[in-house]
Image (tube, rainbow, N blue to C red):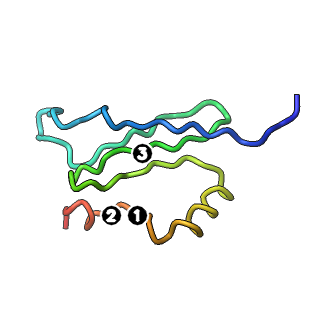
Amino acid sequence: MDDDGPAVVVSSQQHFSFKMVNCGWGKPIFWSYHFPWAGKARYVMPMPSPKGNGDWIVYMHLLKWQMEIIEASAFHVLEPVTANYLNLI
């Protein structure tokens, strides 16, 4: 079988909300859907921002060259999630 290149799984967590979660110390400000991935496929997982302003947070577990392409072509759309963005400071 020929190698067709790296596989990428895209899975939206749009309806997997933590808005009602309270672990005893209050509601989370930010949550992660990162999970260990044993396969060779990479993944992209968009999820609504906890700010509730229509922004999306996009987790990307990709190869270095794939990330370089995204950073070079979507730099005007993507920005890092920081404590400032989450209104923590």
The amino acid marked with disc number 1 is Pro
Residue 80 shown left or right of residue 72 in the figure: left
Which mark is on residue 80? Answer: 1
* Residue beneath disc 2: 82
Q: Which residue is mark 3?
A: 46
Q: Quadrant of residue 25?
A: top left
Which amino acid type is marked by label 3? Pro
| Residue for point 65% across, 55% down | 66
Q: Residues within 10 Å of mark 2 (few under 14, many from 20)?
A: few
Q: Element type at marker 3?
A: strand
| Residue 48, x across and y down, in percent | 31, 46
Q: Quadrant of residue 12?
A: top left
Q: In screen coordinates, is 12 left or right of 55?
A: right
Q: Residues within 10 Å of mark 1 (few under 14, many from 20)?
A: few
* Residue at point 47%, 36% (across, down): 11
Q: Position of residue 49 (x, y in %)?
A: 29, 51
State yes or no: discs 2 and 1 in contact (Cβ < 8 Å). yes
- Give neighbour class at mark 3: few <14, some 14-19, many 20+ (Cα, 10 Å): some
